[in-house]
Amino acid sequence: MKTNQLSVHVATTTRKVGEKVYHSHLLRHSFREDGKVRNVTLANLSMLPDTVIDAIRLGLKGQAVGPVGHSFETMESRPHGHVAAVVGTMKKLGLDRLLAVRPSREKDIALALVAGRLIHPGSKLSLSRHCLGETRMSSLAQVLGVEGATESEFYQSMDWLFERQSKIEAALAKQHLSRGCMVLYDVSGSYFQGKTCPLAQRGYSRDRRSDLLQIVYGLLCNAQGVPVAIEVFEGRTGDPKTVPNQIKKLKERWGLEHVVLVGDRGMITQTRIDEDVEPAHLDYLTALRGPAIEKLCAAKVITPSLFDERNLAEISHPDYPGERLVACFNPFTQEKRQVQRGELLELTDRKLREAHRACIRKVKPLRGKGPIGVEVGKALVAYGMAKYYQVEIGETDFTWSRQAGLHPA
């Protein structure tokens, strides 16, 4: 019986015995005899590994089979998962369509700027290096099609975005703000390296870098904290001075008839309420300053008994007609202040003991009510704790004690 090599194949049969499944791999030759197909088993391959059986199948089909390492060469391998997550989320949120409808190089560069802040936080120079083939640390440039983007292109993209800022903010406001909603507003600042920015000036530095110029910026968000608009101001601009511009955005640019503006006590001051917020028919939510709260406490409007059952209490006072005042008791703030007060009282006691030792020392002791009073006064005002002490000063010495009911416990 003559066999044809091309008719040899691997046949696989499966049989089940109880819960077990058995596979048989047979090397067979098929031929036709007297008009019928006949099979001859040449070898039982069932004991071979599956990878070897697959290689035999490919070889019998005329395909080249060899070691995987000889067939493939790894050219480049870069992290991609985080890039896919960030870029995918940006597109799912519609950020690409928000920036511009038509595709462009500037749009891709802008998207890379946003994604780069999450994936490769750093300067625009460092981001440009991530876009070069020899120095890239991820697939970001390839996914967004910005391979070879330069530092200058990233800076030019900022100008491109600035020209579209109003349209972008209007689209965000339409999507995230509505009549009667709450609008959160806060101000921060950043020190500025350089001397060419007309907005960079010296002012109150939140970064404690009073030696450098700075800029101030205000951010508007919806009630969930989604950013809607941002504006940059001169570095010496006070927080309250930024509020009128935000009201113009809400009323004139976006046409919102009624919203609730939420900001801290250092920003939405009584002056801003009288001159800007109320004339625009906006509601507001802010906090009173310390002196105003002390006045309410002195008038017995706010007393400890208000918080016997709950941490919130609604109060009223003739100085605030038409306004709703809510007093809030924060146990965490109370605990923090008690600890701080205790530390300051201990430091004051130390100062007073130093003054006392000056009165009882053998060499040139401190004498006279005047000189002793000066030293005692220095000790009491050093940490602002004078109201917590009762002092009696004599010609040769003094005594002190903490006032009852004012202990930090």
Image (tube, rainbow, N blue to C red):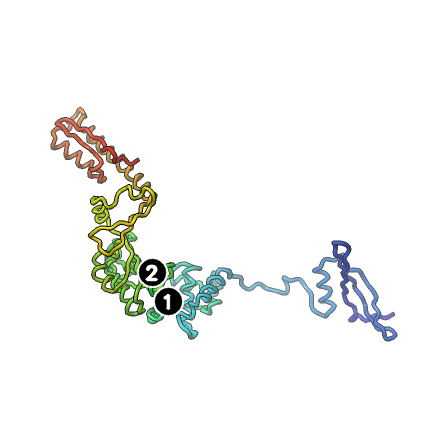
Residue 205 versus residue 62 in the image, above or below:
above
Residue 236 horizontal side relative to residue 371, left or right:
right
Q: Residue at x 27, y 52 (%)?
A: 325
Location of the C terminus by quadrant is top left
Q: Which mark is residue 51?
A: none
| Contact check, label 2 and label 1, Cβ < 8 Å | no
Q: In terms of sequence position, does the residue under pointer 2 or pointer 1 come before the other? A: 1
Residue 225 versus residue 357 in the image, above or below:
below
Which sits in the foreground, 77 or 315? 315
Residue 312 versus residue 6 in the image, above or below:
above
Select label 2 or label 1 by which is in front. Answer: 2
Look at label 2 and name its amino acid. Answer: Met
From the image, tell me which residue sits under label 1.
172
Q: Look at the numbered disc 2 and give the secondary structure of its residue.
A: strand
Residue 263 horizontal side relative to residue 14, left or right:
left
Residue 185 location in percent, x, y? 31, 59
Residue 102 location in percent, x, y? 42, 75
Question: Within 10 angstroms of label 2, few (less than 14), some, or many (20 or more) residues?
Answer: many
Look at label 1 and name its amino acid. Answer: Leu
Confirm whether residue 189 shows in the render.
no
Q: Which mark is residue 182?
A: 2
